[in-house]
């Protein structure tokens, strides 16, 4: 039987992604599908640990996925994701063109449309995942494993841990401590969201449980030694939300007595693990926060000129500079180099700040200063579409509850951490963004497919009575 491309059973079972309209036994298409999924696995596993392998795999996976969507994704081509990608490209072209006539001395030689387009690689990720929860969890697990491998391969290996526990701030050779901490935080959210699945009885139960405990220990320890306040803040907001949502869901879906015992046990476990963790982490956290108190006090007092140029102070002053540039071109921005212009061409910023900092440590300000409100609107539209799709897929029974919980917690976490570092502007954040969003979107597309199939199976009205 010939099935619709990209939106049929083959889309969810085989990496051929529903290319069955060219024949279910077409060996070339099956190999194409498996090769695309394999490239996704290599990308997820090695982009951090071995970029020379993971980088090319990303390019192959993204290009083949886009070709597959445009060639065989009959209904996916009409998805809002593709239209938002087109909008992102057009916004960048418009900003570059208007900037070319307004400030040619500061505009790039050519429009660098990849600045926003790279955030849409999730389209290819979602395609190769094929709506499969199992494949999504596999790819996410490979990404976390690859990150742990990177901790050993980059930097000084085990010496990084010794330095970290001695009170030094370490980054394991992965860009800087903020980006490494972001990975640890994302891993922690995922491990907690999928804890019941990981600790359940069944095949390989002992291996799964030991791996989960080890991964949790690494993430918690990593969050301590990387000493990143923005990540701590984001987790401080996201984790209570996760706990509240889980408690609400568990009380709704289980007998009251069983739910109360489960939640009480979970609370005691958090206390038993949390108290020692807080005692270990208190000193580095307190030291990091204390260093920033003078800047915070000056900001709250409204004495902006007295804000020192420490870690928080540099952020504050560069954000002030960015708002001045945004006020001049709020709709279309200054082009792809807007974030560096806001620093380099602001006269009152010290020269050493211009020499050492090339971005604003706030993705949303960078987006606004570069592409104006039009760029912000594209990103907001993407966030709304993904959020709505996640909700519909969960309500429709396609997206598992633990994956929906992770999606909600990650969304809040991601919004907060990007207020203090421009993760979405760097490959480190783009990697996480595309894998997580791709895993959620693939379930949304699957839900849409089931809705269409259910609609097609309904009896059609006739002009004559039966």
Image: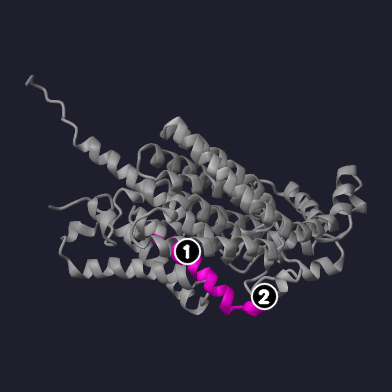
* x and y percentages locating residue 358 in the rendered image: 73, 66
**Magenta span main SS:** helix
Measure how far apart labels 2 and 1 are at the Cα level.
23 Å
Crowding around mark 1 (Cα neighbors within 10 Å: few <14, some 14 to 19, many 20+) is few
Residue at 50% over, 38% down: 261
The residue segment tinted magenta is 138-159
Number of callouts: 2
Residue at 32% over, 70% down: 35
Q: Disc 2 vs disc 1: Cβ atoms closer than 8 Å?
A: no
Crowding around mark 2 (Cα neighbors within 10 Å: few <14, some 14 to 19, many 20+) is many
Q: Can you say whether 186 is above or below 151 in the image?
A: above
- The disc placed on residue 160 is 2
Q: Quadrant of the C terminus?
A: top left
Dot in front, 2 or 1? 1
* x and y percentages locating residue 332 in the rendered image: 64, 50
* x and y percentages locating residue 427 in the rendered image: 57, 66
* x and y percentages locating residue 308 in the rendered image: 89, 57
Is residue 289 found left or right of 20 in the rendered image?
right
Residue sitting nearer the eye, 314 or 182: 182
Residue that badge 1 annotates = 210
**Of callouts 2 and 1, the N-terminal one:** 2
Residue sitting nearer the eye, 64 or 199: 199
Q: In this orientation, does residue 246 appear?
A: no
Q: Quadrant of residue 181?
A: bottom right
Mark 1 element type = helix
Mark 2 element type = helix
State how the image is colored. Answer: one colour
Q: Can you say whether 194 is above or below 262 in the image?
A: below
Residue sitting nearer the eye, 225 or 364: 225
């Amino acid at each position: 039987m010939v099935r619709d491309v990209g939106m049929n059973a083959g889309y969810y079972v085989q990496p051929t992604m529903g290319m069955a309209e060219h024949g279910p036994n077409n060996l070339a298409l099956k190999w194409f599908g498996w090769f695309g999924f394999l490239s996704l696995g290599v990308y997820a596993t090695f982009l951090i640990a071995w970029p020379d392998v993971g980088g090319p795999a990303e390019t192959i996976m993204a290009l083949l996925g886009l070709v597959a969507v445009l060639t065989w994704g009959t209904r996916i081509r009409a998805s809002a994701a593709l239209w938002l990608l087109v909008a992102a490209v057009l916004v960048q072209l418009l900003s570059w063109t208007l900037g070319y006539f307004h400030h040619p001395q500061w505009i790039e030689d050519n429009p660098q449309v990849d600045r926003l387009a790279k955030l849409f690689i999730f389209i290819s990720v979602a395609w190769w995942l094929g709506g499969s929860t199992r494949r999504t969890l596999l790819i996410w697990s490979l990404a976390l494993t690859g990150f742990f491998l990177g901790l050993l391969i980059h930097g000084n290996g085990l010496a990084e841990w010794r330095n970290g526990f001695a009170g030094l701030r370490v980054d394991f050779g992965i860009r800087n401590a903020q980006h490494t901490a972001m990975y640890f935080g994302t891993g922690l959210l995922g491990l907690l969201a999928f804890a019941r699945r990981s600790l359940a009885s069944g095949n390989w139960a002992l291996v799964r449980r030991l791996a989960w405990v080890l991964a949790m220990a690494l993430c918690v320890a990593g969050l301590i030694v990387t000493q990143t306040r923005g990540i701590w803040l984001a987790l401080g907001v996201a984790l209570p939300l996760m706990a509240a949502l889980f408690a609400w869901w568990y009380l709704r879906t289980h007998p009251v007595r069983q739910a109360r015992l489960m939640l009480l046990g979970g609370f005691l476990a958090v206390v038993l693990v949390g108290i020692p963790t807080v005692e270990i982490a208190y000193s580095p956290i307190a030291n990091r926060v204390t260093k920033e108190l003078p800047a915070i006090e000056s900001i709250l007092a409204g004495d902006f000129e007295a804000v020192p140029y420490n870690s928080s102070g540099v952020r504050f002053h560069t954000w002030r500079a960015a708002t001045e540039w945004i006020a001049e071109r709020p709709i279309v921005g200054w082009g792809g180099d807007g974030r560096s212009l806001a620093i380099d061409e602001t006269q009152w910023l010290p020269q050493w700040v211009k020499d050492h900092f090339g971005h604003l440590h706030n993705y949303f300000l960078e987006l606004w200063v570069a592409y104006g409100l039009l760029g912000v609107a594209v990103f907001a539209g993407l966030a709304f579409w993904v959020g709505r799709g996640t909700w519909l897929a969960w309500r429709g029974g396609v997206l598992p509850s633990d994956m929906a919980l992770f999606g909600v917690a990650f969304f809040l976490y991601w919004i907060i951490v990007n207020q203090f570092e421009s993760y979405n502007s760097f490959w480190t954040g783009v990697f996480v963004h595309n894998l997580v969003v791709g895993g959620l979107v693939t379930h949304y597309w699957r839900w849409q497919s089931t809705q269409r199939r259910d609609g097609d199976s309904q009896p059609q009205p006739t002009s004559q009575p039966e």
